[in-house]
Amino acid sequence: MEEKVEREKIRIDNKSGLIIVDVQKDFTPGGALAVPEGDKIIPTINKYIEEFKKAGGKVFATRDWHPENHISFKERGGPWPPHCVQNTEGAEFHPDLKLPEDVEVVSKAYEPDKEAYSGFDGTDLEERLRRYGIEKVFVCGLATDYCVKNTVLDAVSRGFETFLLTDAIKGIDVNPGDSERAIEEMKQKGAKLLNLDDLERVGVREELERKVEEIKKLAEEKAGEISAQVAQKVEEAKKRIKKVVEKEKKELRKSIRKAAKEVRKSIGKTAKELRKTAKKAEREIKGKVRKAVESVAKVVSEAASRLKVGKMKLQKKRLQEKPQKVAKEGKEEKKKVLPGRSISRAIKKGKGGGKAMATKKTAKPKAKKTTTAKKTSTKKK
């Protein structure tokens, strides 16, 4: 029943994806739901894996990942015995399967109430294929009439160029001929049948060239990663420095506030002492000023008293000396006006001479008259 697409070789490249369906322990002889001779296809699958690694293709591996109460189990009315229960040995990939380190594992049927035969059903398989730029998918694994068939049909419906690797699949065949009918259905829907001999094998030179390209690409990626890591480290260092600086600023502000508080306290204390000293000095100065004022006042008072006494003595002396002076002035006046009668007249009018003239206010006008008389006597001459 197997048919080959064409005799020309199909080339695998970095836009090719190998999908290995459910090659788990429970689906191989000795497992809970074993596919007859399911382990026989593993060596061929390993050869496909090698070819994809040489050509730079990407490898994907789907797996049933059922909860203990999955709807497909008989105890819940399903057709199958419990199998591939999460985190059990039966759910592990077969130990002879040589999956590459960078294999993309896709878990399916992990919800209790939802069955999923296709690797695309309820998973992100399509998103992963698109992310890697996959355009051609090559499907193999277990079992032909269930999970392989549904995965192939979903790949075709999603627009991928789909190849069924007929030498790397096995079916359960619950009903005789189920696997053959499944292969025919896949073919009718657009899948191309293929086996290992139909692949264009990658030569040593091509493999080396591909590996060189991979190394270059890896180096670029690593360089990008290193640059990103360096940038990240720089940012982290900046953050740490900023954090340290902020901490130092905080501590510095705290120290400044503490110092300022101490300075204010010291200033306050000093100001208080200065005010106290100033008040004391002020009191002392006021006392000294008061004493000085009192001393000056006393001196002034004494001086005033002495001045008053002296003045009084002077006045008394003057009063005592005045009659004599007046008499003396009178005699001198007489001498000046001796010639003529005007002198005798003046003396007569003064009524008694010098003492009378000193005590009377009209003495000076008389003197004037004497002067007039003098002038008259002079004229007569």
Image (cartoon, helix red, strand yellow):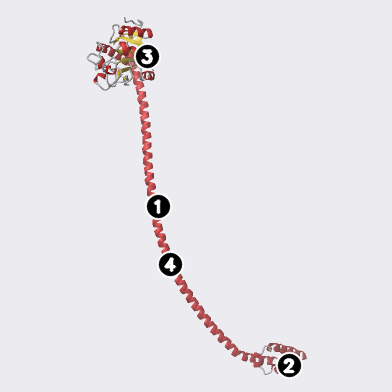
Query: Can you identify the residue that label 4 sits on?
Result: 281
> Looking at the image, do the residues carrying marks 4 and 3 touch, with CB atoms under 8 Å apart?
no
| Label placed on residue 260 | 1
Sequence-first tag of 2 and 4: 4
Q: Position of residue 342 (x, y in %)?
A: 73, 93
- Secondary structure beneath dot 2 equals helix
Where does the N terminus fall, quadrant-wise?
A: top left
Name the amino acid type tagged 3: Asp
Q: Which residue sits at x=31%, y=6%?
A: 180
Mark 3 or mark 2: whose residue is earlier in sequence: 3
Secondary structure category for the residue under label 1: helix
- Sequence order check: which comes first, mark 4 or mark 3? 3
Q: Is residue 254 visible?
A: yes
SS under mark 4: helix
**Which residue lies most toward the left here?**
30
Q: Which is nearer the N-term, disc 2 or disc 1?
A: 1
Q: Earlier in the sequence, mark 3 or mark 1?
A: 3
For the residue pair 372 and 142, the one nearer the viewer reads as 142
Check disc 3 and report its element: helix, strand or loop.
Answer: helix
**Residue that numbered label 3 is attached to:** 154
Kindly check if marks 3 and 2 are in contact, taking CB atoms under 8 A apart as contact: no
Taking the image as shown, residue 81 lies to the left or right of residue 16, namely left
CA separation in Å, label 2 and label 1? 105 Å
Is disc 2 surrounded by few (<14), some (14 to 19) or many (20+) residues within 10 Å? many
Front position among marks 3 and 1 = 3
Bin the neighbour count of mark 3 within 10 Å (Cα to Cα): few under 14, some 14-19, many 20 and up. Answer: some
On screen, 378 above or below 43?
below
Point 56% across, 84% down: residue: 311
C-alpha gap between disc 3 and disc 2: 175 Å
Does 364 sit left or right of 30 as displayed?
A: right
Q: Amino acid at mark 2?
A: Ser
Q: Position of residue 192 (x, y in %)?
A: 36, 8
